[in-house]
Amino acid sequence: MATLTHPLQPTTFYLALPTKTMTTHRQSHSHLHSLRIKASMSSNKPLPGRKLRAAVIGGGPAGSSAAEALAAGGVETFLFERSPPSAAKPCGGAIPLCMLDEFDIPSHLIDRHVTRMRIISPSNLAVDFGKTLRPDEFIAMLRREVLDSFLRSRAESRGANLISGLVTDLELPISSLTAPYVVHYTANNARHSLAVDVVVGADGANSRVAKSIKAGNYACAIAFQERIKLPDDKMEYYENMAEMYVGNDVSPDFYGWVFPKCDHVAVGTGTVRAKQDIKVYQRGIRERVKPKINGGKVIKVEAHPIPEHPRPVRVRGRVALVGDAAGYVTKCSGEGIYFAAKSGRMCGEAIVKASEGGDRMINEDDLKREYLRAWDAKYITTFRFLDLLQRVFYGSNAAREALVELCGDEYVQRMTFESYLYKRLADGDRWKDAKMVLNTIGSLMRCRIVGR
Ligand SMILES: Cc1cc2nc3c(=O)[nH]c(=O)nc-3n(C[C@H](O)[C@H](O)[C@H](O)COP(=O)(O)OP(=O)(O)OC[C@H]3O[C@@H](n4cnc5c(N)ncnc54)[C@H](O)[C@@H]3O)c2cc1C
């Protein structure tokens, strides 16, 4: 048992940690490393004789990426995760190409390289959506248990102390700008406490950290998914194919999906408007794919909330929320893995920068300036745009027919994939952009959405 005393508070805290996890062995990581060097004039107090201490609650993509950036940047970091490495966060596991490079995800973690994406309308009009992909482009499909344990281990290897335990409570400092936050948690059937300077809430959609700091609520969708092992001949069809189904039968406001995994497919759907009927919609998507999954065996059933928009408060005091805890899932596609990892990393780097490599205390303004503002500047437009698309195209079967019709256009496909795969606005062609707008209006009119 290791004893930890917070230098800012005379109380002694006991922490059950194997000695190995207390050791920090940092590997060189040039991108993160460079953050430590920056020395700027700061009004923040230096921390004589010790490093800034951070607790990251939750070891999903958001938490592990935050912990990795913090530890590599010189901050003493504790990463809390309640689930064992084999546990899988309910998820489709689709990630964009740019994440592989940006987060150095090794290719052996990828189950499937999806190069064919089929979108199927309420009237069963099917459009192939991957026609404009270049030979080296694909959507990577992973199992979350595989991705999450990899990212967590990497954070540990960069110096984060991984604590396998459930955080039960976060005690806030009553007054002082430098007094510690106290993380209460259970591990190995015992209660423990740890005092820290900074907290990163990466504990997902049901975030306890968000509740502790009264960050406010967000609307949530519920997503339901069955993992189905298919006979070999049926699995062949999904070799490199993912399907999206739209229609009132599969969801009143989202889409149903079939995503291929190593030896099975994930079949699921989601809704925000009619959560009580989620099982009805799941039956709907199963009905639509029936001939393709006949003979399959359900090996896992899972469900989880998906946040619909960012929380009213994402930073309070020296606590910052990232990933699902903050509400970073895009509408329309329901994508959250990349944004979780990215926000975790951005937040970790922001703390490293503001604390000058862990040598100074930080404050709320630092977190707002270095993390929140940078995040909003980079992504808020994307989130708003996808919100608008969801409102226009997912509201009725007529609108969904228009969506599928539009997806047949190669220019629309290229623009969509460019922005999804690389998380950047594709270089458009003004003439083609104007044509795309006209086509959109045309499709909506044909499907009787506009002008009613
Ligand atoms: C059915 C479904 C399908 C989806 N499909 C996709 C997809 O294909 N692609 C995509 O990009 N996104 C998808 N998403 C969204 C994606 O899963 C999330 O956006 C992403 O997991 C967010 O990552 P995170 O690290 O913020 O949170 P999480 O992945 O939820 O991780 C939070 C972690 O915190 C831990 N934790 C929570 N509370 C505590 C506590 N008190 N103490 C200790 N540890 C704690 C949890 O065990 C968990 O490991 C899907 C979501 C669902 C529900």
Image (cartoon, helix red, strand yellow):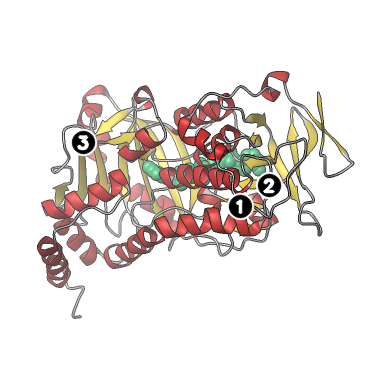
Assess whether mark 3 and mark 1 are in contact (beta carbons under 8 angstroms): no
Residue located 38% across and 57% down the image: 331
Q: CA distance from mark 1 to mark 2?
A: 8 Å
> Closer to us: mark 3 or mark 2?
2
Comparing 159 with 89, the one in front is: 159
Assess whether mark 2 and mark 3 are in contact (beta carbons under 8 angstroms): no
Q: State which tag comes first along the sequence, 1 or 3.
A: 3
- Most distant residue in the bottom direction: 452
> Closer to us: mark 1 or mark 3?
1
Assess whether mark 2 and mark 1 are in contact (beta carbons under 8 angstroms): yes
Residue 320's label in the rendered image is 1
Q: Is mark 1 within 8 Å of ligand 1?
A: no
Q: Is residue 10 left or right of residue 296?
A: right
Q: Is residue 440 left or right of residue 24?
A: left
Q: Quarter of the image holding residue 121?
A: bottom left
Q: Is residue 263 left or right of residue 436?
A: right
| Residue position for label 3 | 115
Secondary structure of the residue carrying tag 3 is loop
Q: Is residue 427 left or right of residue 324?
A: left
Residue 27's place in the image compared with 398, above or below, is: above
Residue 392 visible in image: yes
Q: State which tag comes first along the sequence, 3 or 2.
A: 3
- Whole-percent x and y of residue 403? 20, 60
| Residue position for label 2 | 198
Residue type at mark 3 is Thr
Q: State which tag comes first along the sequence, 1 or 2.
A: 2
Secondary structure of the residue carrying tag 1 is strand
Residue located 70% across and 48% down the image: 361
Residue type at mark 1 is Ala
